[in-house]
Amino acid sequence: MSIESNLLKKERQNVTFSVEELTNVWDGGKEDTEIRRKVVKVFGDDPVLKSPPICTMTREERYTEATRKCVYIFRNMLQKNGIYPGSKEFEHFWNAMPIEYTLLIHMGAFIPCIMSFGSEEQVAKWLPLSANLNIICTYAQTELGHGSFLRGLETEATFDRETQEFVINCPKVSSMKWWPGDMGLNANHALVMANLIVGGKKYGMHPFMVQIRDLSTHMPLPGVTVGDIGSKMGFEAIDNGFLYMKNVRIPRENLLNKNSEVKPDGTYVKKASDRLMYGSMVNLRVNLPKSQAIDVLAKACTIAIRYSAVRRQGLLNPGGAEVAVLDYTLQQHKLIPQLATVYATKFAGEGIIKKHQAFLQNMAKGNISDLAEIHALSASFKASVSEQCTEGVEVCRRACGGHGYSQASGLPHLLSKVTPTCTYEGENTVLYLQTARYLVKCAKEKAADLPESILFLVQPIQNARGNITSLDNLALYFKNRAALCVQAASKKVNQMSNKGLAMHEAWDKSSVQLVHATKAYVIQYIFDAFASFVKEVKCSKSVKEILEDLCCLYGLHYINNCSGDFLKLGILTAHHCNIAEEAEIALLEKLRPNAVGIVDAFDFTDSSMESCLGAYDGNVYERLFDMAKLSPLNKEPVHQASYKYLRPYLLEGRDILEGAKSKL
Ligand SMILES: CCCCCCCCCC/C=C\CCCCCC(=O)SCCNC(=O)CCNC(=O)[C@H](O)C(C)(C)COP(=O)(O)OP(=O)(O)OC[C@H]1O[C@@H](n2cnc3c(N)ncnc32)[C@H](O)[C@@H]1OP(=O)(O)O
Ligand SMILES: Cc1cc2nc3c(=O)[nH]c(=O)nc-3n(C[C@H](O)[C@H](O)[C@H](O)COP(=O)(O)OP(=O)(O)OC[C@H]3O[C@@H](n4cnc5c(N)ncnc54)[C@H](O)[C@@H]3O)c2cc1C
């Protein structure tokens, strides 16, 4: 056993709580842990799902491998292993997925869309085909020229009454669809968001099923220009694509018509609120943070904390032995708050998923009264979580020094996976502004007209009592701050408008304060949800203490990072801030001996991280060396480029050096 493995073993001996029990809490119960492990094992044991490490493959190989494995998973493995939407197995399915995948937009975005936009007959037609991969369909909304401002989308679907068809056109280069996942190479259909035009009248964005490739040859159909958009910052395996359509004709029935319809005579019939057109985005904003951001940060924490426990660098005591970098207070200050973020966002996210499920049940009965609340909550939650996790992964990466820059650490891959969560499914600033709209409206309402989650906005500010670092008091500081920030931002909008500015100008001039207020709102939501979870969860005292400490740390770390705000608003005094700073440092010291145990409790397999720094056994140096040997650049002892470009000068060097030697 290497020295490094021994060091991790010792760390594990010092853990003061049951790692298995914390794993159960993380998974949602003992039974869930068993199911997750079963799913992970089935996938992990299957030889078909083995691939070379991603950092040794080209982009083309990564796309090919990911497609090969995902086709196998979706066609052969899901049904066979009882993994279907709604099952417990499905909830844990992400943990078993290969490190890179394709067909995600088809499975994760298109399928939910067909279910929310399609009529019963349309769902009956398209759902089995797509579930069996008989068709591959992308979600094509964003265009080269527009992504955020959906009313600016330019693709048109014009109704031709004569032929009972829609004619799809991208009038300009800027109107071509650009970015959709699975679209470049795999998809033969696209769910295209286009402006509906009937009899010269525009009806706004509607969803259309458009076939883009031939069903037998997979060649693009006439009028269709489609391909991959090229190399990106990450997502090398995914064929994000472009799609340019010129006079592409589709049958009238291909307008997904659950919410609105065009009759054969051209009559437009609206069956439900326009806002439900945005429903698919709410669905993804609620569901993607866990797998695409929170788990990514949890993996980064696992890698950085295990590595920091084995990496020896420098001395704490003059004359003493070299210490693990995790023993430095500053390293703890970087990494342990990231663990707190993982827990806070995961448990707050579960609350939002439940709220969304309740909303969907009500919607099925025709009641969409909670739509504004769930839209505001999901938009700001997705924005805040993606931001916190992206920052957190970069902190973890840099906390691993030079090795964190190596692909072999697994951290650059995680960073490039989490970064676009700040952009896709709604650019974060745009989403914060959406929530701000709702908050400003709520601030003007009477308490009786507001949902419970937002009541604090209009209630009198309460003073904290007793220990300032108690979870109750921390929750109160966050609520008070959110209420005061929202009121201040609303006041600014009103003042600007009273000065004579048009409302949209007043809004733009107040937008810095509006986004700030929204961030305050969503952080109070996350903290409150995590604190409530910690209070209610049934577990042993030792595990509860870990959760309480993480919750307290999440609150204190946030407050200490923006204490100016709390001071400015009169919520905390300088004395309070000093106490909060010391309390955070004390918590770091307290949590340090359990840090490895806490990341072990995430229970990630080594193969799900592909990290030389983060493997369970801590054998970092051997793994780094072994991985370097696999680099394609090391295939031959001398690379062709050296022969081709360097050799003449090296030979000159040889002659000079050997000449000098013979003169000696
Ligand atoms: C095996 C599979 C498992 C599946 C698991 C699930 C996990 C899946 C994981 C997938 C992971 C990765 C996939 C990556 C996917 C990426 C896909 C994409 O990126 S698709 C493209 C996404 N694009 C956007 O999100 C665009 C963002 N822009 C907008 O949302 C809108 O344009 C805008 C709302 C910001 C502005 O539009 P505008 O027309 O100007 O609207 P108004 O601002 O005037 O608002 C009108 C009105 O509507 C309300 N509104 C807005 N949005 C919504 C909504 N979503 N829901 C409900 N209501 C909404 C808004 O509040 C206004 O209301 P008022 O009362 O008038 O204030
Ligand atoms: C990896 C990845 C996968 C994607 N997958 C898909 C997909 O499958 N299907 C799909 O349709 N799309 C997809 N997209 C596109 C994605 O949804 C858009 O990029 C996203 O919605 C942002 O839009 P945009 O690119 O137009 O940014 P822009 O809106 O142009 O943003 C540029 C800047 O302008 C700012 N800005 C914009 N509007 C405002 C405003 N009102 N007030 C203040 N500031 C503003 C933004 O904050 C940002 O700083 C994907 C994108 C990525 C990166």
Image: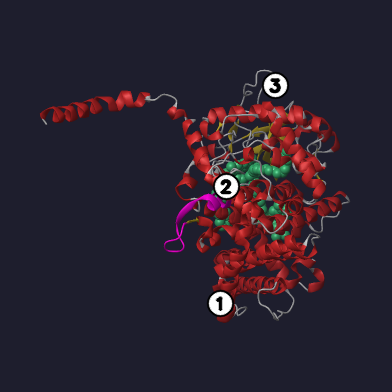
Labelled pair 3, 1 in contact (Cβ < 8 Å): no
Foreground pick, 140 / 169 = 140
Alpha-carbon span between mark 2 and mark 1: 39 Å
Under mark 2, the amino acid is Asn
Looking at the rendering, the stretch of residues picked out in magenta corresponds to 302-321
Judging by the rendered image, the residue that carries numbered circle 3 is 215
Looking at the image, residue 25 sits to the left or right of residue 228; the answer is: right
View extreme (left): residue: 663
**Residue found at the far right of this picture:** 365
Q: Position of residue 375 (x, y in %)?
A: 72, 56
Give the mark nearest the N terminus, 2 or 3: 2
Q: Position of residue 414 (x, y in %)?
A: 57, 45
The residue that label 1 is drawn on is 578
Q: Does the magenta run of residues contain 317?
A: yes
Residue 597 image offset from top left, x and y in percent: 65, 53
Tell me the amino acid under the disc marked 3: Leu
When the figure is inspected, residue 179 is found, relative to residue 515, above or below; the finding is above
Q: Is residue 248 visible?
A: no
On the image, numbered disc 2 is attached to which residue? Answer: 6
- The quarter holding residue 471 reads bottom right
Q: Which mark is residue 450?
A: none
* x then y, percent, for residue 120: 85, 37
Q: Residues within 10 Å of mark 2 (few under 14, many from 20)?
A: some
Disc 2 to disc 3, C-alpha distance:
57 Å
Visible residue check, residue 39:
yes
Instruction: Identify which residue is drawn at 68% across, 57% down.
Output: 343
Confirm if mark 2 falls within 8 A of ligand 1.
no
Q: Mark 2 or mark 3: which is in front?
A: 2
